[in-house]
Image (spheres, rainbow, N blue to C red):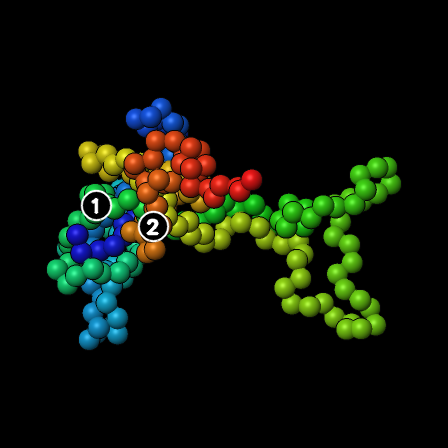
């Protein structure tokens, strides 16, 4: 496929076992189906990219006239979520469908999501402060002093204080692909993905996949502990 990413939804977490009987925690993602709604070109837009939309049921009354005309120009159905992804080649055109099969030859993916919102949080929860004494008469969850009085007579920028926690864009890189279900467009990745259930995520091919060393994390490894002991330098008596 000529694009590097796809939109999806977070279904939830589970665990699977590999051939050796080792358990792996995985996140199930519904990757697509998506459709290309627009192609950005260097001549017209100043950069090259593909605008993709997650195909899901949406009422016509929920789509304004501007977006209705935008979808009609490319002859695509109305979509809920729209994102731009990079192009790998110039073969893509508006109206092409994007499925989970773009990751058939990949081992790692990068996932971008929005973390869960925690509201207004204090420094104990937001920054992990230790707090004060917890005995009677103490307010152990207060922040304490935030600077001197006479000099510099101000609070430095970046001071860790209470405030809005969560609901931020988080990127998790190099999640290993543990399974692909072509029939239901499901992608199983090892590890956690930011966001709640049914939250939208952007899944793309890993920009900098890790280089696995043979004998440690490669497929030829039989026992990682024995391999590490064998590779460790021996102590001279």
- Nearest the camera: 2 or 67? 2
Can you say whether 173 is above or below 159 in the image? above
The residue wearing badge 1 is: 105
Q: Position of residue 197 (x, y in %)?
A: 41, 38
Which of the two discs, 2 and 1, sits closer to the camera? 2
The image quadrant where one finds the C terminus is top right
Q: Residue furthest right?
A: 137
Q: Pointer 1: residues within 10 angstroms few (<14), some, or many (20+)? A: few
At a point 74% along the width and 70% down the height, the residue shown is 154
Compared across the picture, whether 32 is left or right of 117 comes to left
The residue at the point 53 percent across, 41 percent down is: 235
Element assignment for label 1:
loop
Residue 186 lies in what quarter of the image? top left
Please state the horizontal and vertical placement of residue 49, each as a whole percent of the image: 24, 63
135 or 82: nearer the eye?
A: 135
Instruction: Look at mark 2 in the image and give the residue it sits on.
Output: 211
Could you say where residue 228 lies in the image, as x and y percent from the top left?
Answer: 44, 38
Query: Where residue 182 sits in the image (x, y, percent)?
Result: 20, 36
Q: Outermost residue, front direction? A: 237
The local crowd at label 2, few if under 14, some if 14 to 19, many if 20 or more residues have their Cα within 10 Å, is few
Residue that extends furthest to the top in the rendered view of this protein: 21
């Amino acid at each position: 496929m000529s694009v590097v990413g796809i939109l999806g939804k977070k279904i939830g977490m589970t665990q699977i076992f590999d051939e050796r009987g080792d358990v792996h925690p995985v996140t199930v993602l519904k990757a697509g189906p998506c459709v290309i709604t627009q192609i950005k070109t260097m001549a017209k837009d100043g950069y090259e990219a593909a605008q993709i939309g997650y195909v899901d049921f949406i009422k016509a009354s929920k789509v304004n006239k501007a977006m209705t005309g935008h979808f009609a120009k490319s002859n695509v159905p109305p979509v809920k979520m729209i994102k731009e992804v990079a192009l790998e080649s110039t073969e893509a055109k508006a109206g092409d469908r994007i499925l989970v099969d773009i990751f058939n030859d990949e081992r790692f993916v990068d996932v971008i999501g929005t973390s869960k919102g925690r509201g207004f949080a204090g420094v104990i929860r937001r920054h992990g402060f230790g707090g004060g004494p917890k005995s009677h008469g103490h307010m152990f969850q207060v922040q304490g002093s935030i600077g001197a009085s006479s000099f510099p007579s101000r609070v430095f920028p970046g001071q860790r204080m209470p405030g809005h926690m969560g609901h931020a864009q988080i990127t998790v890189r190099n999640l290993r692909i543990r399974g692909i279900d072509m029939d239901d467009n499901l992608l199983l990745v090892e590890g956690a993905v930011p966001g709640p259930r049914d939250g939208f995520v952007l899944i793309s091919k890993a920009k900098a996949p890790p280089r696995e060393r043979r004998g440690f994390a490669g497929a030829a490894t039989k026992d990682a502990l024995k391999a590490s002991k064998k590779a460790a330098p021996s102590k001279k008596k």
